[in-house]
Amino acid sequence: MIQRIDVSRGHGYPLLLGATLDELGGHLKTAYGTSGHYLLITNDVVAGYYADKLLDGMKDLKTDLITVPDGEQEKSLDRISKLTEQALQFKADRDTVVLALGGGVIGDLSGFFASIFMRGMRYIHIPTTLLSQIDSSIGGKVAVNHPSGKNLLGSFYAPQAVWTDFDTLQTLPWEEMRNGLAETIKHALVADPDLFEFIEEHADAIKGLDYKIIKEMSLRSLAVKVKIVTEDEKEKGNRMLLNLGHSFGHALETEEAYQGVMHGEGVSIGIAAAANLSRERGLVNDKQLDRILNLLMKMDLPTTAKAHDRAVLLGHMSADKKNKAGNKVLILPVGIGRSVIAADCNDEEILRAWEKVII
C-alpha cells in the first residue's frame, strides 16, 4: 500500500512511499492523462536494473529514454548541454515531464535540467538509492557541480512528486547503502537522538541488510528531512542544519574533482571533522564524540581522509553556499540529536579540525 506524506510549505508535493515502479504509469495517466510526453533520464547502471520495469507500466504513454554515464562527474554543465540536445531530438517541450530515475546524481542533474530547459518543465523524482530516498529527492534542491565547488550552480525547484519504491534498495551494493547511511546518521545528529540510538542498536541488522529494519530507519530518517524542509523551503534558517558535515565533505569532493571520495564518504569525514571541532568548543564531550565516530566506523564509513593540503581544503570551503559576508558558516553537533549554525568559526580552528581527520 502506498503511503503519502506531503511536503506542504511553498510549492507542495507528495512523497509516495512504497510505490512500485510499474505502478507509475497508472499514476501518470490519472495525473496528466494519456496524451503527454515523458522524458525518462537515468544512468546506464540504473537502466539495466529498473528501466524496463518502469517502462512496462508506461506502454500506453509516449516515453523517450536518455541514459547518461554513471558518476558524480556527470553533474556538469557539459552534461546539461548534451541533455538539451537529446531532449530537442525527442521534440521535448514545456509540457514534457521529466522522470528522474536513479540516485542523487541523476536527481540533481535531471531536476536542474528540468528547471532551466525552456525556462522550466515538470519533473518527478524516482529515487533508487538509500541516499536519494531519505535525503536528496526531498526538498527541491537541484544543481550541478563546478570545478570551483560542489553544487554551485543550482536552484530550488520542487518536483511534482517523489515516487519511492523501497524494493530498489535490495539491489544496492553495500558501498551505496553506506553512502546513504552517512546522511541518515546526519539526520539523527541534527534532530533525532532516538534515531541515532536505533541505528546503534540495529547496526548489525542494517549491515546484514535486514530490509525491514532498513525501511523503518529510512522512514524515520526522511521524516527529519521532511519536517525541516517544510519549515524552511529556501534554506534561510534551520534548513542549513541539514548541511552538517557537508562543508568539509564538499571541500574533499571538490579537491578530488568529484572522482575520489563518494558523497556519503565525504559527509562522513565531514561529520567527524565537525564533531572534533564541537569537542574543542565544548559542544560535545569525549563520550559523545566517541559515539559519533564509532557509529560511523561501525557502518564502514570513513572518519579520516588521505593526505591533502589543509590550506587548499580550507580555500575550497570559501565557496560554501552557507557562508555570509565572507565568514565561513559551519554546522556543528551539540551532543547527540541537536546541531547549531556556527557563523563565527575562524580559520585556525577549522584547520585544527582538518588536522584531526587528514592522515
Image (cartoon, helix red, strand yellow):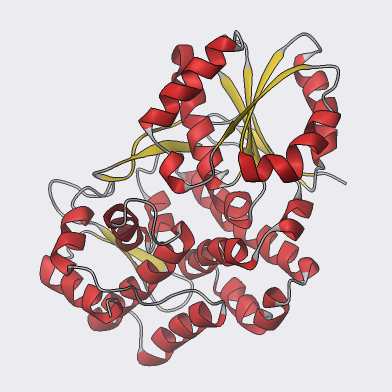
In the picture provided, is 191 more to the left or to the right than 258? right
The answer to which image quadrant residue 54 occupies is top right
What is the residue that sits farthest to the right in this orientation? 1
* Residue 10 is at least partly visible in this image: no
The answer to which image quadrant residue 153 occupies is top left
Position above or below: 214 against 14: below
The quadrant the C terminus occupies is bottom left
Q: Residue at x 57, y 57 (%)?
A: 224
Number of numbered callouts drawn:
0
Q: Nearer the viewer, residue 237 or 217?
A: 217
Q: Position of residue 305 (x, y in %)?
A: 33, 73
In the picture provided, is 287 more to the left or to the right than 173? left
Q: Position of residue 22 (x, y in %)?
A: 84, 36
* Residue 23 is at least partly visible in this image: yes
Position above or below: 63 against 194: above
Q: Residue at x 69, y 80 (%)?
A: 202
Q: Residue at x 62, y 40 (%)?
A: 44
Q: Nearer the viewer, residue 282 or 39?
A: 39
The answer to which image quadrant residue 160 occupies is top right
In the picture provided, is 71 more to the left or to the right than 258? right
Position above or below: 13 against 321: above
Q: Residue at x 24, y 82 (%)?
A: 280
Q: Position of residue 219 (x, y in %)?
A: 69, 58
In the picture provided, is 163 more to the left or to the right than 223? right
